[in-house]
Structure formats: C-alpha cells, structure tokens
Amino acid sequence: MLEWVRAILLGLIQGVTEFLPISSDGHLSLLQILSQGWGEKSQETGPYHVFFDVMLHVGTTVAILVHYRKQIAAGIKGFLGDPHVPDFYVRPALFRLAGLVFVALLPLLPVVLVKDKIEETYENLYVVGFGFLTTAVVLLVTHFLSGGKKGPDTMTWVDALLIGCAQALAPLPGVSRSGLTIAAALMRGCTKSWSVGFSLAIAVPAIGGATLLQLRKLLHMELSSSQIAQILLASTIAGLVGYVAILWLLRIVRSERLWYFSVYLFVLSAVILFWLAPRHGTHKSTEAAPQGLGQSVRQRADTATADGNWPRANSVHCTVCISA
C-alpha cells in the first residue's frame, strides 16, 4: 500500500513542480533526503526506480505536446507544404524555429563534462537551499520585467543562446529551469506568451532525448503487474497535473505574477538553510565513485533503494540536465 501512496505522491510532485518555477528536482531531492528511513525495506531494484523517474518525465512531456497539439498539427501541415497555414507555420519559419531551439540547447553540452560533480550536490541540503534562493531572486526580478514584442519571427540567435545559458544552470538542485528561461526570455524582450512557449519548446528535446537514452538502457527490465500499474498511475497523474500546471503558468506570466513564487521559495530556502540543513547535515551516499553515465545512475538508484528509500531525484534530473 505504501508503494501506491508513493507513486501517487511522486506523480503529483512531478506534475506540479515540472512546469511551475519552483524546481521539480529540488523538491524531489529534498523529499529524498528527508525521507531516509521512512517505510519498510524496498525489494525493488535500482533500475526500476530509474525507469519510474523516466516515465514521470514522459507523462509531463506528453502534457506539453497535448497543450500545443493544434500548433504541432499546424506545423506538420506547414512542413508538408500546406499553403493555407499561417505564416509562422510555413517551412522556412519552422526551420528557423528549429535552429533557435538547437542554439538554445548548445550550452547544455559542457554540463555533461561535470555531471558527476553536479550529482554530488543533490546530497547536500545547503546546495539545495541556495538553489531555491537563487530561483527566488530571479523570480523576484521578473516583477520589474514586462516583456517586449519579440516573438518566434523576431527572436534573435543571441536571444536563444542566452536563454540556453540560463537553462544550463538547471541541473543544479533547487534551480528552476522554467523560472530561469522565462526570466531570461523576458529580459531579452520576448512577449510573455512566447517566453513560456520557447521555454517549453526547448524542454521537449532535452527531456525527450534523455528519456530515450535511459529507456534504451532499461529495455530488458522485468516488471511485475503491480509495478507496471504504479508506473502508469504515477505517469498519468504527472501528465494530468502537468497539463493544468502549464495553463496556470501561462496565466501567471501574463498577469505578471511570476514573482509570487519567490515568496514561497524565499521561505523554503530559509527553512532549509537555517533549520533542516544544520539538523540533517550533508546526506552521504555509500556507493563507489561513478564510472560512466549508466553505471552512475544505477549505482545511485541501487544505494537509494537498499534501505527502503524513495526513488532518487537526481537519477534522471541531473543526467537529463533539465529541471522545472
């Protein structure tokens, strides 16, 4: 029964925090550290929990695709040469958009070189707390930003690169990918709607690519019917809640209330830095040093589940280089 409760809770957390600018990986990492020793010993393997985390991301990625289904359909028609689509969906405009997304993803490449160091930060409440504090400051700054008039047809390559640089900070726990990228887009003079749209657009290939990479490594897993049901339930919850979160995010940005989340994050960071971190210290993992991406993920997940803990938040978030 406890595993079902965990599945529901993790699905809710993923759906709410993946798109809202409060850092999904920061919350999941905090939950993981604080839940040490909760519940009974788990008999599930580390790869299962990695797969579980991957499927949560699939659920929220589907939420993006469903929300922008009309735009995607129009883009497909335009790519196939339909002359009746709006100018934004004609083939040259689509190629330009693809180029902007590609440029925005380039700053993520160097992050791979330091992924092991980043993974270690997920075990330190002080780092998590400062990550939340950083996001809070950035969101507070958005209170003084009204955006501009730039859309997909007027955004420059420099704009895309700088927004991508903001996204490159996302692997750090507590740092919100959506918060930083939306704020960066507003600073560069993008409209409110396009700031959210481009932030979500560059999330899909990053999350989708990392998801495929992890799934390829876990193709030969054997899952029980109960495990499959829990994964489907959690992924569905994450997708449904994530869809609502996207609608909420758009409304919040348009009404210039993104900074409201900074109040919550300031309080949360203060609680972590001045109360939780001194009490819990740095959570140390007992596994050997990582040796490669796949082994690192499995080692961390195996160690996390050996004492009945929840799925490791950093098993996918860090290697994906994405967080909310």
Image (tube, grey):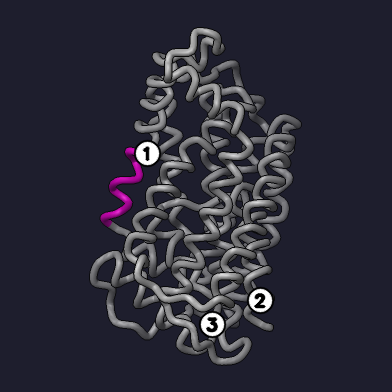
Q: Camera-side residue: 75 or 36?
A: 75
Residue at the extreme left of the image, as rendered: 291
x and y percent of residue 234 in the render? 62, 64
Q: What's the mark number on residue 105?
A: 1
197 relative to 286, above or below: above
x and y percent of residue 90 in the render? 46, 14
Q: In which quarter of the image is residue 291?
A: bottom left
x and y percent of residue 259 in the render? 69, 42
| Of labels 3 and 2, the one closer to you | 2
Which three-letter amino acid code belongs to the residue tagged 1?
Leu
Q: Camera-side residue: 240 or 225?
A: 225
Q: At 35% across and 70% down in the image, what residue appears?
A: 220
Q: How far apart are marks 1 and 3 (CA)?
A: 33 Å
Q: At 48% across and 83% down in the image, what residue appears?
A: 44
Q: In this view, does 91 lie to the left or right of 145?
A: left
Q: At 68% across and 49% down in the image, what residue appears?
A: 262
Local crowd at mark 1 within 10 Å, few (<14), some, or many (≥20)?
many
Q: In which quarter of the image is residue 103?
A: top left
Which three-letter amino acid code belongs to the residue tagged 3?
Asn
Is residue 112 magenta-colored? yes
Is residue 205 magenta-colored? no
